[in-house]
Structure formats: structure tokens, C-alpha cells
């Protein structure tokens, strides 16, 4: 795990890179320059510590900088009879590129963002992993090409201007959509894509080399028993690889859920001294007792991390600034604290990221398994509209009434709004308070959405496909990368292995959602490994007391940022609406009010502390 940066036709200040991104690679810093190409690498030493130095060159033909891990690289060396001078996965990438060109990406099981300077072709070959676990941002204009692992670093390397039109995406989606960023001429390389940049004329060509939609389209006729065995086998393979691809000790985050419980149970088969970590903090739910059952069953070296939010007010800006862009997900706060504490014990940690999006772990998936809400039905839509307009919204997001109200909201919506209502649900039904930009600010989102929503997939596969491409990519993986790397720690998710990503999407819907039970096949697998009390637990993330924060601990900051005349949000949201929200003059569910104010607070912190 590392940080990378570089440029074509632009002077690279190594001091700026180290200052803004040194946390990603505190162990070693090295550079490479060839004519108009500059590459810089910040190393967090985990694999082949002695010989894995970067930038790494091969026969004066190629030079690479690499952020991530290739977990099956030794298998690939044996499979293709590749011989190198080190045991580094970085060298394996060079050997594979030399043999296969861009076609080698299909063989990799890993998380990666890397840049290869091909001196023969005078070009940069830049690639990103299937899910987008490792970040890559780039600035391109006719005069220069500049890139970095983090936006804050990129901003320190070249002057950047705000792209105001993109902030409407943030307000509706809670994140910047796929390749979009807060800045002009700056893009994020999309998951499963690669770039070829000509070092002479600076032309940039992007190619999608992997798309999960291809695997959702596949028809899988495996029996449930065979599917269960395959899921078990692939998860064992993924965990084993992620444990063995490290010269440092690997630990495991352990919540009270089945995802991290399965990872921990399997990891303990290969590491009898596995260290596990559970978070415990003041809130509505404490997962520590359930996690302890797993730790005791597998005799792990267990640490319960007690998180206090006593310093939340003073830490808030520091945590959010790490993202380099407005970041809506409030679970970024406990994620940062957990990683900070776990880093005191291990540098490499296993997580359960991706299991919900692949196996059907969210409660909102249940209705989509029964009915394709993306297909318009006028009778259903009118009936749902009557219900929604007759009854008030719920203040209890876990209640049955709230579930019915959300169903009515879905059924009464149309097109993209269905997906937004089912997901982040920030400004849905309050879009009239937006400052009209005079154009369709969701055009790019709607175009991609329509391709999936109007396709031949089931309703469940459609929303899971959309979540993988948006929610997982733009929110959850960003959160985990920044939370861990801000503390010089590496997170690894077995559920995002090549084999699982290319098998599980094709499974029948009823293997994932059965009745009202989410993640059915994974729960059946969990019955083999985990204590019974965990198996039927509902999906729980960090139970963030956001309403309490907004009205108490962070109330002063919320009012200071959002009541100021010098605010950024007024470019997009009518100030009167925000003031009425602050003073509770608008009839709105408490949870939704808190989400909107948090979204705007994050926006203002970014604008005043990062951009200005």
C-alpha cells in the first residue's frame, strides 16, 4: 500500500507530495525522471520489504509506480513461468505487462492503481482494479498531465478551479459520480478501467477492461448446494491470499455481523494467533458482545476498541479534510477512530467490504427482489402517491411504518429518482429548494442509470449493479481507503476478490434474498462457522447518532458554518430553506433533517478548509 504521484510536462515538487500525502507511504520516498515524465512513490512497506523499492524498472524498457497489492502474483509467476529478480508483486506486474500488454489485467486478483512508463511506446499505461479499491485522480489539459492518489495532493501539484456544476451531483447522490470531481479538468479513473496517455501529444484514451454488468447478465444454473460450496471455496481462497501476501502481521476487523465474522473464522484457520478488533462506542447499538462470541469461538487475540466522541468537535475538520472533497458519509468519523486505534497493533487489516453489495445485504433490496420498481406501472404509482401524500413520514427509520412509507416513496417516483429514494435519500422531495442551474445536472448519471434500469436484468440485480458502481465505488471504498491510509494502515477485503466478483453476481436472486431474509446464501454459509446469535442479525453499519450530533455536540459548528453569509452552498441551495431547517421551521423527519445539514456542513468544511 502506497501513494503515487507524477506528471508529464509539469515540474513535480516532491516536498509538496510528501507534505500532503506522506501518510500513505511513511517508510520510503523515491522518484524517477525520464525526459518530460516524472514519477514519485511513497511506500508503506508490507511485501518484499527489502527488494520492493519503487519506482521499479525492467530492462530500461518500463518503469512502474504501484499502489495496492496483487494477492495471486506468485501463482501467476508459476502459471506463466515468469522469472524475476525479486519476490515483489510490483515486479510481477512489469513481467506480465512485458508478456501480455494490457491483456494481463484479467488475471489479477488484487486492489491496484499503477502507472507504467513504457519507454518503447513513449506512453503511460495506467490501470485501476475491478471495484476501484485503490484511488487514482488525474488532471489533463493540452499542456500537461498530472496525477496523484489523493485530491489534496493533486491540488498541491497544480492550480485547480472549482467545477460548480458537479456539486449538484454531490447534493443528490452524497458523492461525486464515478469519474466526476469538484475540480475542472480533474477526473477520477473509473473502476475496471485503464488509460493510455501519449507522452508526446498528451492524448488520453480510456478503456473499460472490466464491468460487473457482464457478470450480472450471465445465467448461472448451479444448484444452491453447489453455489454454497463455491462461495465457501472462493472465500477461503481470497482470505488465504490476503493473509499470505504480507511480510507483516495481518489482523481482522470483527463486528457483530456475519461478513467480518466469516472472514475472521476462515482467517483463523490459517493464522492461529489472529488479532481481531471490535469497535464499541456510545450509540444505539453495541456490537461488541456478539463479536466477542466469535473471538472466543476461534480463540483470537481480541481487542475491544472503545471509541469516545468527546473530541468530535475538535477532530471533525481534520477527519473530513482528509478526503479532499465534500464527503457525505458520517460513518467516516468512527471509521477513522477505529483505524487509528487498530494501527497501534497491526498495519494490515481484513475487512468485510463489498459483501452487502454482492450478496444482497441491505434491507432495501427485499422489495426489489419481489417487484421491479424500475418498470413503470401507472396504477401502482398512483396508489403509492396517494399513500405517501396522505400519511406523514416516520421519525423512526427502523419501524415497519417507515418501511412502508419508503416503499410508497419508491413506487411513486420515476426513473432515477427511484434509485435515489431507495439509497442515500438526502434531498429527495426537497429538490424544489435547489437553485435552478438551467440544465440537467444528473444527465451523466441518468444516462448510465437508464442502460441498467431499462435492461433485461431483474429488479434486484439492477439495484445491486447500480450500488456496486455508485455506492460502493464512490462512498464505501473511498471511506475505507482514506480512513485507513490517513493512519498509514492497509485494509484488505476478501469479498472483492476476482473469483467472488466474477461468480456471485450470476447467482439467482432467491439465493440472495429469500422472503424477507437478506444475504440468504451467506447466512447459510455463516451457519457453518459462526455462533447462532450472529446469523439472523439484521444489517448494521456504525450506528451513528447523527441527529444527536447535529442538535448537541456539533450544533455550534453547524450554525457557524451554515448561518454565515459567506457560504458556498447558496450557489446550489436556497439559503432560506437552510435557515428554516436550522431553526426547525420546516416539517421534516428528524433523520432527514440531520442528513441534509450534515451534507451541507461537509460541503462548507471542504470549501473553507481545503479549497480556499
Image (cartoon, grey):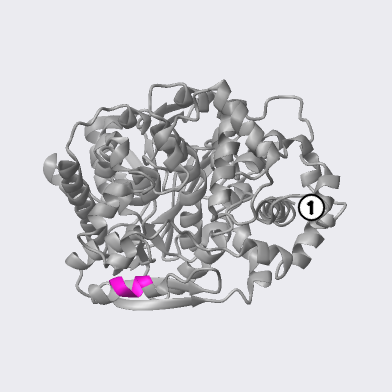
Residue 496 visible to an observer of this rendering? yes
* Identity of the residue drawn at 58% across and 37% down: 408
| Residue 125, percent from left and from top | 39, 34
Residue 476's place in the image compared with 486, above or below, is above
How many callouts does the rendering have?
1
* Identity of the residue drawn at 79% across and 35% down: 435
Residue 471's place in the image compared with 479, above or below, is above
Residue receiving disc 1: 581
Q: Closest to the observer: 422 or 81? A: 422
Residue 408's place in the image compared with 73, above or below, is above
* Identity of the residue drawn at 50% across and 30% down: 373
Q: Main secondary structure of the magenta part?
A: helix
Region rendered in magenta? 290-294
Q: Closest to the observer: 231 or 514? A: 514
Packing grade of label 1 (10 A; few <14, some 14-19, many >=20) is some
* Identity of the residue drawn at 39% across and 66% down: 255
Q: Is residue 138 left or right of residue 213?
A: right
Q: Is residue 64 left or right of residue 149?
A: left
| Residue 600, percent from left and from top | 71, 51
Q: Closest to the observer: 325 or 86? A: 325
Q: In the picture, residue 610 is in which quadrant?
A: bottom right
Q: Is residue 339 magenta?
A: no
Local SS, label 1: helix
Quarter holding the N terminus is bottom left
Residue 125 visible to an observer of this rendering? no
Residue most extreme to the right:
565
| Residue 213, percent from left and from top | 37, 30
Amino acid at each position: 500500500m502506497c501513494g503515487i504521484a507524477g506528471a508529464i510536462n509539469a515540474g513535480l515538487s516532491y516536498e509538496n507530495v510528501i507534505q500532503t500525502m506522506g501518510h500513505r507511504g511513511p517508510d520510503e520516498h523515491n522518484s524517477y525522471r525520464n525526459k518530460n515524465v516524472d514519477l514519485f512513490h511513497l511506500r508503506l512497506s508490507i511485501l518484499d520489504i527489502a527488494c520492493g523499492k519503487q519506482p521499479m524498472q525492467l530492462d530500461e524498457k518500463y518503469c512502474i509506480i504501484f499502489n495496492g497489492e496483487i494477492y495471486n502474483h506468485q501463482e501467476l509467476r508459476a502459471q506463466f513461468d515468469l522469472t524475476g529478480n525479486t519476490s515483489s508483486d510490483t515486479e510481477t506486474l512489469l513481467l506480465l505487462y512485458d508478456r501480455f500488454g494490457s491483456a494481463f489485467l484479467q488475471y489479477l486478483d488484487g486492489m491496484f492503481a499503477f502507472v507504467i512508463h513504457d519507454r518503447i511506446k513513449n506512453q503511460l499505461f495506467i490501470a485501476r482494479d475491478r471495484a476501484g479499491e485503490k484511488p487514482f485522480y488525474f488532471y489533463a489539459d493540452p499542456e500537461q498531465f498530472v496525477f496523484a492518489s489523493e485530491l489534496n495532493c493533486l491540488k498541491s501539484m497544480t492550480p485547480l478551479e472549482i467545477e460548480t456544476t458537479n456539486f449538484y451531483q454531490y447534493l443528490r447522490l452524497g458523492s461525486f459520480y464515478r469519474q466526476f470531481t469538484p475540480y475542472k479538468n480533474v477526473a477520477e479513473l473509473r473502476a475496471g478501467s485503464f488509460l493510455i496517455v501519449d507522452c508526446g501529444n498528451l492524448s488520453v484514451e480510456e478503456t473499460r477492461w472490466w464491468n460487473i454488468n457482464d457478470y450480472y447478465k450471465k445465467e448461472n444454473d448451479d444448484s444452491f448446494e453447489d453455489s454454497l460450496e463455491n462461495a465457501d471455496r472462493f472465500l477461503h481462497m481470497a482470505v488465504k491470499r490476503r493473509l499470505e501476501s504480507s511480510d507483516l502481521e495481518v489482523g481482522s476487523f470483527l463486528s457483530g455481523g456475519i461478513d467480518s465474522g466469516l472472514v475472521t473464522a476462515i482467517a483463523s484457520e490459517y493464522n492461529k494467533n489472529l488479532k481481531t478488533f471490535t469497535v464499541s462506542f456510545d450509540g444505539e447499538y453495541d456490537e461488541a458482545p456478539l463479536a466477542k462470541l466469535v473471538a472466543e469461538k476461534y480463540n483470537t487475540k481480541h481487542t475491544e476498541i472503545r471509541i469516545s466522541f468527546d473530541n468530535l468537535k475538535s477532530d471533525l475538520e481534520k477527519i473530513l479534510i482528509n478526503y479532499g472533497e465534500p464527503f457525505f458519509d458520517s460513518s467516516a468519523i468512527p471509521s477513522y477512530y477505529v483505524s487509528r486505534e487498530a494501527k497501534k497493533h497491526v498495519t494490515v487489516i481484513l475487512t468485510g467490504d463489498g459483501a452487502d453489495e454482492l450478496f444482497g445485504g441491505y434491507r432495501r433490496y427485499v422489495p426489489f427482489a419481489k417487484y421491479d420498481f424500475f418498470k413503470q406501472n401507472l396504477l401502482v404509482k398512483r396508489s403509492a402517491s396517494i399513500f405517501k401524500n396522505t400519511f406523514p413520514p416516520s421519525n423512526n427509520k427502523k419501524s415497519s411504518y417507515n418501511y412502508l412509507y419508503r416503499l410508497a416513496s419508491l413506487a411513486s417516483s420515476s426513473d432515477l429518482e427511484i434509485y435515489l429514494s431507495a439509497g442515500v435519500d438526502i434531498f429527495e422531495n426537497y429538490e424544489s429548494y435547489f437553485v435552478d442551474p438551467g440544465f440537467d445536472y444528473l444527465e451523466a448519471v441518468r444516462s448510465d442509470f437508464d442502460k441498467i434500469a431499462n435492461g433485461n436484468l431483474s429488479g434486484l440485480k439492477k439495484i445491486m449493479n447500480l450500488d456496486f458502481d455508485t455506492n460502493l465505488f464512490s462512498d464505501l471504498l473511498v471511506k475505507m481507503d482514506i480512513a485507513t491510509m490517513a493512519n498509514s494502515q492497509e485494509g484488505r477485503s476478501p469479498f472483492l476478490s476476482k473469483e467472488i466478483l466474477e461468480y456471485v453476481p450470476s447467482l439467482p436472486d432467491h439465493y440472495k434474498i429469500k422472503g424477507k431474509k437478506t444475504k440468504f446464501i451467506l447466512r447459510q454459509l455463516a451457519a457453518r462457522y459462526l455462533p447462532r446469535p450472529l446469523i439472523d442479525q439484521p444489517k448494521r453499519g456504525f450506528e451513528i447518532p447523527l441527529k444527536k450530533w447535529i442538535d448537541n455536540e456539533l450544533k455550534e459548528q453547524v450554525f457557524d458554518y451554515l448561518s454565515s453569509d459567506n457560504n458556498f452552498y447558496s450557489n446550489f441551495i436556497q439559503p432560506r430553506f437552510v435557515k428554516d431547517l436550522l431553526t426547525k421551521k420546516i416539517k421534516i423527519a428528524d433523520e432527514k433533517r440531520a442528513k441534509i445539514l450534515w451534507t451541507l456542513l461537509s460541503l462548507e468544511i471542504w470549501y473553507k478548509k481545503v479549497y480556499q
